[in-house]
Image (tube, rainbow, N blue to C red):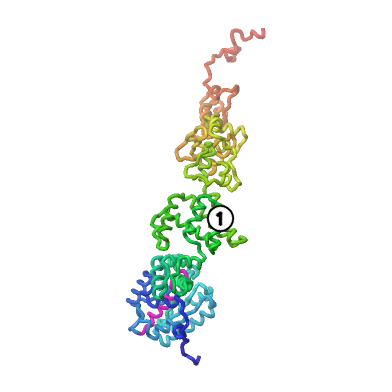
Amino acid sequence: MNDSSPPPTDSQTGAYQVLARKYRPGHFRDLIGQEAMVQTLTNAFAHDRIAHAFILTGVRGVGKTTTARIIAKGLNCIRGDGPTIDPCGECEACTSIADGRNVDVLEMDAASNTGVGDVREIIDSVRYRASAARYKVYIIDEVHMLSTSAFNALLKTLEEPPEHVKFIFATTEIRKVPVTVLSRCQRFDLRRIEPEAMLAHLRGVAEKEGAKIADEALALITRAAEGSVRDALSLLDQAIAHGRGGEDETSAAEVRAMLGLADRGRVIDLFEAIMKGDAAGALQELEAQYADGADPAVVLRDLAELTHWISVLKISAEAAEDPTVSAAERARGSDLAGRLSMRVLTRAWQMLLKAIEEVPIAPSAMMAAEMAVIRLTHVADLPPPEDLVRRLTEGSAGTPSGGRPGPGNGGGGPAAQLTALAGGVVSAPGLAPKAEAETALAAYTRFEDVTALLRAERDIKLLDEAETHIRLVRFRPGVIEFNPAPGAPANLAGRLSQRLRDLTGARWQVAVVAEEGRPSIAERVLAEKDAAKARAAEHPLVLAALESFPGAEIRAVRPIGGDGAPEEYLAPAPERTFVEVEGDLVDDDDYGDDPFEEDN
């Protein structure tokens, strides 16, 4: 181009420069909240150990591009003999880099230059030395947007660039950058700015601008910025304009209206009404906040944020020392953390997350918020499920431990509360009052009574598993504790408990314990069979049979008559006498006094 004059800057044209650009850091000492990175770069510059490629990552607005420009100025500042960690900011190299017009410092937006052709232009140009600066610096913003082929084309040059070339990459999505690129760069993770540092920075900028803004308003801006300096300065710019350009102090109420936020104190009021189960009062408060300009979706997010904060307060009291939270809010939050259980808070958190997801698909955001409040108030006063079951089994009408009296909005007793807790789908059939339960269990004094019940109900599969796999440790009516035999189903205890509850109408506690139990019924039966075989093998008749038939074995032992135990029929044979009759030996008991008396 023939016209080489730089474009006029905002200061030259008299145009207003937004605070995010006006107070952009020009030196490493101006960066806030990035001490670790500054220390590493300071040492690298001091000992001439400057890497040929850097990659800067972090959320939006924490200073990635700004840091890249400061590094470029430090590499090319001409006030010293070489690269410096403290560029002057006044020489031609520093001012041209700050204005974005230095021909040797090329900034490229990878979001709009994603192809391999754009990278090939860089590869072709690195062979030429810098025309005016000490180093040729390539700053590629949002580098993760490059295509795979573009990354591959850049690898060789990135690994072994010429001595006069430096690469600086910036990205908000470090996981999308190939590891082959990451391994060739020196990585710096820029942190979110802590609330204390952000508040101090915003207060200093407001003083330099001559603007009056309340500390509570600055706290709201800090919270909304979520650690991003650029977002905070943009919101501060807007807040100053909202407060009539600095003539009057900008209040927290004005900033809250500007951001579409509800008053934090009123959010706590709404939360307290919900936790009390006061549906009408909670809906009235939500309607009032909506009428005052609060966004219902933002109110739901505020409730979720408050729930999270109170949950953290319950675990760590140090979380209350948040500079963005007022003393009154801190006191109310600590009080709620002391009164609410973690179970209630986690349930509210899950329900709020679900409500936030419903906002885009609801007919209106207000409808979604109202339905969320109604659901939250109707489950807020429910006691834990185990207390409900205890009330049902014990027939108690009192308030369970850990529960709170209801707000007077009904409930229908413990059975109705259990149904409400289960979403109206599941109830608790078969659970008898305590006296009836004890009567029902009185018939089961031994574990064999339980197996007899299963046999009578022809529940063959569960009966077989109970007899085969349960090694009983302790038993009393309503309680079975056992050590499972090898191969026992993992859900045997639960299935047996549920089946016995269905059959008896009483609650059975079936538990697996680590103690050694007695042999199972099947193991005892097998042991008895083996003992019977051993005893049978000692009987003279069996011994004679085994000797007469080599290879024979005892398969089973059964009584030969009657209902007695096998050992009654396998006792040693009584002594017997024989007499000779016509050359044959005949049992004396059979022969008698006159063997031929019957025939005669």
Q: Residue at x 52, y 73 (%)?
A: 145
x and y, in percent, of residue 20 in the image = 45, 75
> Which of 121/60 is in front?
60
Q: Is residue 280 above or below residue 493?
A: below
Q: Is residue 88 left or right of residue 184?
A: left
Residue wearing tag 1 = 283
Q: Residue at x 35, y 71 (%)?
A: 39
Q: Residue at x 51, y 43 (%)?
A: 386
Q: Is residue 477 left or right of residue 86?
A: right
On the image, which quarter does residue 38 sit in? bottom left
> Which of 211/508 is in front?
211
x and y, in percent, of residue 161 in the image = 43, 79
Q: Quadrant of the C terminus?
A: top right
- In magenta stretch: residue 59: yes
Residue closest to the far bottom: 2
x and y, in percent, of residue 494 in the image = 54, 41
- In magenta stretch: residue 212: no
Residue closest to the far right: 599
> Which of 548/330 is in front?
330
Q: Which residues are magenta?
A: 56-78
Q: Is residue 584 left or right of residue 8?
A: right
Q: Is residue 255 left or right of residue 461?
A: left
> Which of 321/384 is in front?
321
On the image, which quarter does residue 581 sit in? top right
- Callout 1 secondary element: helix
Dot 1 amino acid type: Leu
x and y, in percent, of residue 170 in the image = 46, 73
